[in-house]
Image (cartoon, helix red, strand yellow):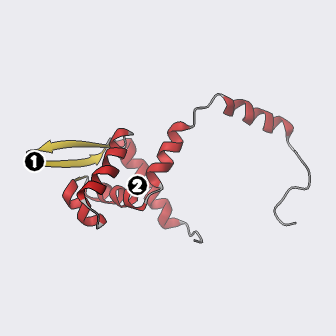
């Protein structure tokens, strides 16, 4: 059998407690964060903004080997969900991570990805 329980529920109190706590939790923010990290282009954007703090759309597009339109789509998604912010300087739009908390989370995520080995 391996790693499967042979009974239905072992710790009924723990199961009931977690289920009770989960019914009041709004997990939608975590789901959005999952979407932010589930796309390789967005992860490359995170890596770039973690490394250089701020980059213009055209440079990010070159890094992604993508069009400016596609890159802008990813950046709008991140901005809409308050993961990134932008500023305009003349005709150039620069993006950065929204705040230090996001920067720290991205750094932790990137560090974690270097320290664990996953089978693909």
Report the front residue among 19 and 79.
79
For mark 2, does the 10 Å Cα neighbourhood hold few (<14), some (14 to 19), or many (20 or more) residues? some
Whether 58 is drawn above or below 77: the answer is: below
Q: Position of residue 87 (x, y in %)?
A: 19, 42
Report the front residue among 89 and 100.
89
Whether 94 is drawn above or below 39: the answer is: above
Q: Which residue is located at x 48 percent, y 43 percent?
A: 32
- CA–CA distance between discs 1 and 2? 30 Å
Q: Disc 1 on helix, strand or loop?
A: loop
Mark 1 or 2, nearer chain start: 1
Q: Position of residue 84 (x, y in %)?
A: 32, 44
**Residue at the far right in the pictured view:** 7
Answer yes or no: do the residues labelled 1 and 2 have beta carbons within 8 Å?
no
Image quarter of residue 40: bottom left
Position of residue 113 in the picture relative to residue 118 (left or right):
left
**Mark 2 highlights which residue?**
107
For mark 1, does the 10 Å Cα neighbourhood hold few (<14), some (14 to 19), or many (20 or more) residues? few
**Mark 1 highlights which residue?**
91
Position of residue 95 in the picture relative to residue 41 (left or right):
left
Image quarter of residue 3: bottom right
Report the front residue among 65 and 83.
65
**Residue at the far top in the pictured view:** 24
Image quarter of residue 50: bottom left
Q: Position of residue 69 (x, y in %)?
A: 26, 54
Which is in the foreground here, disc 1 or disc 2?
Answer: 1
Q: Disc 2 on helix, strand or loop?
A: helix
Q: Which residue is located at x 36 percent, y 55 percent?
A: 46
Please identify the quadrant where the N terminus is shown.
bottom right
Please identify the quadrant where the C terminus is shown.
bottom right
């Amino acid at each position: 059998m391996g790693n499967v329980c042979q009974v239905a529920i072992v710790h009924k109190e723990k199961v009931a407690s977690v289920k009770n706590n989960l019914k009041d939790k709004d997990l939608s923010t975590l789901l959005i964060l999952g979407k932010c990290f589930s796309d390789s282009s967005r992860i490359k954007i995170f890596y770039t903004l973690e490394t250089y703090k701020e980059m213009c759309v055209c440079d990010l597009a070159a890094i992604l080997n993508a069009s400016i339109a596609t890159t802008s789509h990813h950046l709008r998604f991140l901005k809409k969900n308050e993961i990134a912010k932008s500023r305009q300087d003349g005709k150039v739009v620069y993006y950065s991570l929204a705040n230090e908390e996001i920067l720290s989370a991205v750094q932790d995520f990137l560090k974690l990805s270097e320290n664990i080995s996953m089978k693909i």
